[in-house]
Image: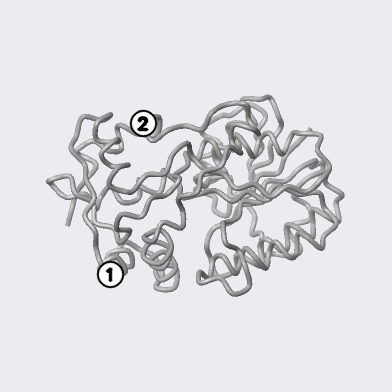
Amino acid sequence: MKVLVTGASGNVGSLVVRTLSERKVAVRGVVRREKSAAALRARDLPGVEVVVADLADEKAVPALLDGIDAVFLATGNTADQLTQEQQVIRAAAAAGVRRLVKLSVGGASPDAPLTLARVHYAAEQELASSGLAYTVLRPAFFMDNLLQYVPWIDSSGQLPLPTGDGAMAMIHAQDIADVAAVELTSELTGNRDLALTGPEALTIGQALHRVGQVVGRQLSHVDSTREEFLRRYIEAGATPEYAEDIATLYDGILRPGYGAAITDTVEKTTGSSPRSIDDFARDHAADFSPTGATGS
């Protein structure tokens, strides 16, 4: 079989590509930029074909589905995200692919407080009416999200984020990729909606403490305001619209503990327990080294 993986250079998409390659499944990985394609080709993964394409281009997308049996759909948080996902879903349905696995979010609805959740809801409506067999993945807060904030860690090891003492069932991105790989290659015919979490609910402070214990560095969390987060996140390159969404997620959803529920879906699907924050720390020890934090 052959699987189309969109967002093949992303946090989850790149892991799906690698996981499928390791399982000797042929992959067509789609990226938006030639630079990303070159980096993916440089990994020299067996059975992986890399293609540069604009998923929002209605004329370009159908050719990507030639010879494809299943699709992993993940797109970036861009202004044309919904258009990209709609184009892929429609092309996949026209090509008669066996299954589409979509990376989504929890709380997707037409009146969700987050723009990204409303976008995912609209894409899911397209998927539900497409006639495709599908799986929707709804992961909890990614442990990997912590990596983008390493430069924010100051000389004393403190990281400011507006999450308070809200606990969240953090998940390792590799567990998401493992579930996706199972779903993409299974013989299931029905539709599935899977909430994915790690093995425990942790506050940001607890997570950082555990990471610090593994990497040999004192790390801690200090609560910050929504306004301070917005300033720093926009300065780091986020658009104001996306920054507002993430601030709402942290301050309005994670702070009250709405992300703390734990599921056993990863273990039921893959046969293995989900990775812990300690596993994540061992995987990224170099990223959390003192030289990785510049502070400001």
Give the quarter of the figure containing the C terminus.
bottom left
Frontmost residue, 19 versus 163:
163
- The amino acid type, in three-letter code, at marker 2 is Asp
Q: Could you say which disc has been placed on residue 215 in the image?
A: none
Secondary structure type for disc 1: helix
**Residue assigned mark 1:** 231
Residue beneath the point at 53% across and 29% down: 273
Q: Is residue 66 left or right of residue 193?
A: right
When the figure is inspected, residue 81 is found, relative to residue 132, above or below; the finding is: below
Residue beneath the point at 27% across and 47% down: 205
Frontmost residue, 77 versus 186:
186
Frontmost residue, 56 versus 159:
159
When the figure is inspected, residue 280 is found, relative to residue 81, above or below; the finding is: above
When the figure is inspected, residue 88 is found, relative to residue 101, above or below; the finding is: below
**Residue assigned mark 2:** 278
Name the spot of residue 5 as percent of width and height, x first.
66, 44
Name the spot of residue 91 as percent of width and height, x first.
79, 57
Determine the CA span between mark 2 and mark 1.
31 Å
Quarter occupied by residue 218? top left
- Callout 2: 10 Å neighbours few (<14), some, many (20+)? some
